[in-house]
Image: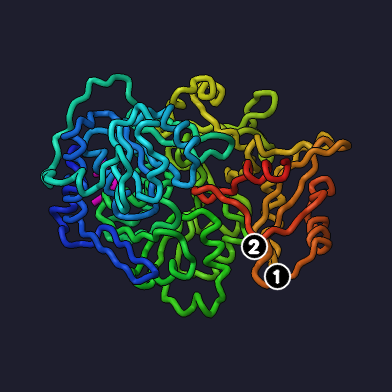
């Protein structure tokens, strides 16, 4: 079975349930000993019960449903149920505040909400006029909400017949960004192009694969890869909450073959004592997809050393642009800082400050991409969408260069760039250098106001466990490898750095803390 089959007229989950009814579809194996194994037949029946219940209460074709919850079978089931009922689902980061959730709901105008009991307070029905029903699983419902068991009681397990809706102008796919530069934006897309589908097919390894979710299903990357794995007949292993040592246990126990991860999770895995890693047989792991945020070269080196039998691929992209570049395993260590060449079916241009297309290598410019998978608008924000366009090409504001061989290098987000004494400084370059130091676990560099220079780089540093490196040693290290104007003007040691659910550094939160 291939990924291309996802686009045919039959429902692939139903086909898998018929072809391999007793094969594990989703495994939820938690450190406390609780184990839940759901077969393809059981998953499809659960999905159908939810989908038919949705149809019975008026969920129509093209309508939107929002969901919030930690990784579990139910958050996978609701997505396929919404799809089978003729609508689509929107994931919400359960760490958002109520006001942030209300802002997103106000833009997306969903008609149903699906939430774990821990987050039921985010969905008080009287406060959300567009939502007709709030269904609560894994916990008690509040007044005005419906318990999951009551909602699906008596619902059929047969394939649903989607209800046609009178609603017009709905968007076929709506994804909310992780909110790197502000409140999450609603990205309107019309599915993936053939080239993107074929790329994912190859990376997921077909229906025999076992995919472990490394991160939150509320983030588009892990969620998309997990659900696509199910649709091609693969098994998905869940972690309710990421834990590095338990991740190794699951890889060994279920012979995991592939995963997709932001750098922070794998940084924790590689930081485990070597003796602890070697106790686990991870030889089944064949493909790791580095994505969500740039993996520093030092982390790639650590991963390749720790998992020599696993191919490390890197994808650079975004919710808006889908996959833009691909870095193959053979180029990971020989091209430090590169995120690879243009992905199949993708055209890339770099544009300088004078709006001219860059043709010479090693010149920084804003990256624009064009492909069949690129988004078509921001929901409710036509102005922001128009600003992202240059003809048929779109951008999210990343600055990049390319070398003589066509490999691309992401400098940083245009909005994160500092200007100190008239010189452009890309924080990512400094962070990558800092994280190559053997005593530094992670870093973040931001700009602080400076009367003389306008801005100056300030570094926040998390030492490795047991690390004793001093600020003087770090600054000396920076002076040996960076131009003087790029060396942090100040630094501080912190116990940890905040991250978004996608795994990216929460730079806005860091800036807000320092400037308060």
Image height of 317 relative to 70, above or below: above
Residue under the point 58% across and 68% down: 271
| Nearer to us in this view, 429 or 109 | 109
Please rate how many residues cluster around mark 1, counting C-alpha atoms within 10 Å: few if below 14, some from 14 to 19, many from 20: few
In this rendering, position of residue 481 left or right of residue 216: right
In this rendering, position of residue 354 left or right of residue 109: right
Can you give x and y, in whole percent of width and height, for residue 265 in the image? 51, 59
| Nearer to us in this view, 487 or 452 | 452
In terms of secondary structure, what is the magenta stretch mainly? helix
Number of numbered labels in the structure image: 2
Can you give x and y, in whole percent of width and height, for residue 39 in the image? 21, 59
| Label 2 sits on residue | 441
Can you give x and y, in whole percent of width and height, for residue 17 in the image? 16, 53
Query: Is residue 369 among what the camera can see?
Result: yes
Image height of 185 relative to 210, above or below: above
For this orientation, the residue located farthest to the front is 143
Element under disc 1: loop
Query: Are dots 2 and 1 in contact, CB under 8 Å?
Result: yes
Element under disc 2: strand
Q: Is residue 417 magenta?
A: no
Q: Disc 2 to disc 1, how far (Cα)?
A: 9 Å
2 or 1: tag closer to the N-terminus? 2
Residue 31 lies in quadrant:
bottom left
| Label 1 sits on residue | 467
Please rate how many residues cluster around mark 2, counting C-alpha atoms within 10 Å: few if below 14, some from 14 to 19, many from 20: many
Part of the protein shown in magenta: 1-6
Residue under the point 82% across and 34% down: 422
Residue under the point 64% across and 31% down: 358
């Amino acid at each position: 079975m291939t990924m291309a089959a996802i686009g045919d007229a039959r429902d692939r989950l139903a086909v898998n349930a018929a072809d391999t009814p007793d094969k594990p579809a989703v495994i939820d194996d938690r450190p406390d000993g609780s184990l839940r194994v759901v077969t393809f037949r059981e998953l499809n029946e659960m999905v159908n019960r939810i989908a038919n219940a949705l149809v019975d209460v008026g969920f129509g074709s093209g309508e939107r449903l929002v969901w919030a919850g930690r990784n579990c079978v139910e958050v996978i089931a609701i997505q396929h149920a919404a799809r089978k009922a003729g609508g689509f689902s929107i994931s919400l980061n359960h760490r958002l505040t109520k006001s942030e959730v209300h802002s997103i709901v106000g833009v997306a105008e969903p008609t149903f909400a699906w939430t774990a009991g821990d987050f039921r307070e985010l969905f008080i029905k009287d406060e959300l006029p567009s939502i007709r029903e709030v269904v609560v699983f894994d916990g008690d419902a509040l007044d005005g909400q419906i318990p999951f068991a009551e909602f699906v009681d008596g619902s059929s397990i047969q394939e649903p017949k989607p209800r046609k809706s009178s609603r017009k102008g709905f968007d076929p796919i709506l994804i909310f960004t992780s909110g790197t530069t502000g409140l999450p934006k609603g990205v309107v897309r019309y599915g993936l192009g053939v080239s993107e589908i074929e790329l994912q097919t190859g990376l997921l390894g077909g229906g025999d694969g076992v995919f472990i979710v490394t991160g939150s299903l509320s983030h588009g990357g892990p969620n998309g890869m997990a659900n696509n794995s199910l649709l091609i007949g693969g098994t998905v292993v869940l972690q309710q909450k990421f834990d590095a040592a338990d991740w190794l246990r699951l890889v060994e126990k279920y012979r995991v073959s592939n995963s997709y991860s932001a750098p922070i999770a794998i940084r924790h895995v590689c930081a485990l004592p070597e003796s602890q890693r070697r106790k686990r047989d991870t030889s089944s792991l064949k493909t790791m997809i580095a994505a969500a945020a740039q993996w520093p070269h030092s982390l790639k080196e650590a991963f390749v050393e720790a998992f020599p039998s696993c191919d490390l691929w890197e994808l650079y992209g975004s919710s808006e642009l889908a996959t833009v570049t691909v870095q193959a395993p053979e180029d990971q260590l020989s091209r430090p800082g590169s995120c690879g060449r243009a992905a199949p079916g993708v055209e890339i241009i770099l544009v300088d400050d004078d709006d001219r297309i860059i043709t010479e290598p090693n010149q920084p410019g804003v990256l624009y991409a064009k492909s069949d998978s690129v988004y078509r608008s921001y929901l409710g924000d036509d102005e922001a969408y128009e600003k992202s366009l240059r003809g048929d090409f779109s951008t999210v504001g990343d600055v990049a260069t390319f070398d003589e061989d066509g490999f691309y290098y992401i400098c940083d987000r245009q909005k994160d760039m500092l200007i100190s004494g008239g010189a452009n400084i890309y924080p990512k370059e400094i962070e990558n250098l800092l994280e190559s130091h053997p005593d530094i676990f992670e870093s973040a560099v931001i700009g602080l106001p400076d009367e003389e220079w306008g801005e100056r780089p300030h570094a926040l540093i998390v030492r490795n466990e047991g690390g004793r490196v001093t600020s003087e040693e770090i600054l000396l290290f920076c002076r040996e490898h960076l131009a003087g104007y790029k060396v942090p003007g100040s630094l501080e040691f912190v116990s940890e750095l905040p991250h978004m659910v996608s795994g990216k550094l929460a730079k806005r939160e860091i800036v807000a803390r320092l400037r308060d």
